[in-house]
Amino acid sequence: MFCSEEVKPPEEARLSHEMNGSGYQSLGIDAGRGEEGEEEKEEEKEEEGGGCVLPQDTVCSSGCGTKMWTAALLTVLLSSVDSDEYCYNQPDCDPYAWGDMFPSCHPLLEEHHSPINLDQHTTRNVSLGPLHLEGFDVTQPGHWTLNNDGHSVVLQVGGGMSVSGGGLPDVYHTIQLHFHWGGPATNGSEHTVDRRRFPMEMHIVNMKSIHPNITAALDDPTGLAVLGFFIDVAYAENVHFGHISQKLSSVAYKGQTTRVKPFPLMSLLPKHNMSQYYRYSGSLTTPPCSQVVLWTLYEIPVFISWSQLAQFTSQIFSTEEDADQVTPLQNNFRHVHPTFSRTISASRDARLLAGGAGRPLGSPVSLQLLQMVLLGGFLSAL
Ligand SMILES: [Zn+2]
């Protein structure tokens, strides 16, 4: 019933990946930015001949001392950057290489990345009550659209829903929800709890209502509010989740789209535990990794069946339908990042990780969570 797994081998493997030079370590000029001021960087650029990334004796000997050459090179590089060019499973485009293509994804340049690991280092904020989820408990008119974008399965939910309260600075319109998952034998949530990863994670993305489009929201440090839900596995089918999982076969390949009949979104959520959550400021977990997200992570998971989980891990492909080799989309999660100086707030009713900074746990988090889930199930059955 309870399937979170401790994160160790994947992270160790990825660390060795970094050390092999195909990740952060390969970024000559970028790797130094975390330790230098802007002025020093500009001086260094001038000395090296207008911003050459590689050593002068290998590149600048053929005449790249002119800024015009560099500008032309940068133009070519930037025009080739497309948000579609990132991936999760190839060394040249996986999350450890995103910083090469999208500087704002580089962990040495920016410090407020997501996802993070949640542990007992939280600060209780009694003013954080439940969020107001407008329109989540009714059936919206029209239709929703489910799409395979090559990186996830995205449900565009149109208008009519919004989130506010719970410490959010504004009203945020609900735009879409999507999922992150692992493989047949590995978990794939993005955030972890005491270093344990859940089988899946669902993100409900909401945009601050004052912004006309996502481009404007990405310029606002609190432009997006994302609600994150861990997804765990039980033996019973989740009939509400079936509204989505039953449609997955229609969006097996990248670019495919299908209609979904709207349903009350609240039916997907742990409605008896919506006041138990954690809040922190972070980033998009996909390129361009913009640090504009107020994260709300709920501590009680959504439960789905093994077969519903398998539909994600085996029936979604990251390539075009007519490609020679189709690759199942698996492990579409970004690695966890340090919290640095960020405060992780526990809501007034959060129970799992609100023991105060550094206080040792009385019992394992997984056992505490199991007890809470069982109790919640008992109460909801009354
Ligand atoms: Zn996401």
Image (cartoon, grey):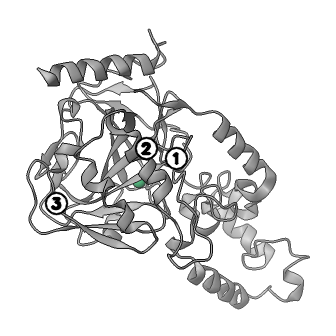
Q: Amino acid at mark 1?
A: Gly
Indicate the secondary structure of the residue bearing disc 1.
Answer: loop
Mark 2 / mark 1, whichever is N-terminal? 1
With 331 as the anchor, is 347 left or right in this view?
left
- Residue, disc 3: 262
Indicate the secondary structure of the residue bearing disc 2.
Answer: strand
Answer with the quadrant where ligand 1 appears in the image: bottom left
- The reply to whether dot 3 and dot 2 touch (C-beta < 8 Å) is no
Q: Give the image location of residue 200, x and y in percent.
A: 43, 44
Which quadrant is home to the N terminus?
top left
Tell me what residue is drawn at x 71 percent, y 43 percent: 13
- Residue, disc 2: 200
Q: Give the image location of residue 183, x and y in percent.
A: 54, 47
Indicate the secondary structure of the residue bearing disc 3.
Answer: loop
Residue 312: mark in rendering:
none
- Residue, disc 1: 182
In the figure, residue 160 lies in which quadrant? bottom left
Tell me what residue is drawn at x 49 percent, y 18 percent: 358
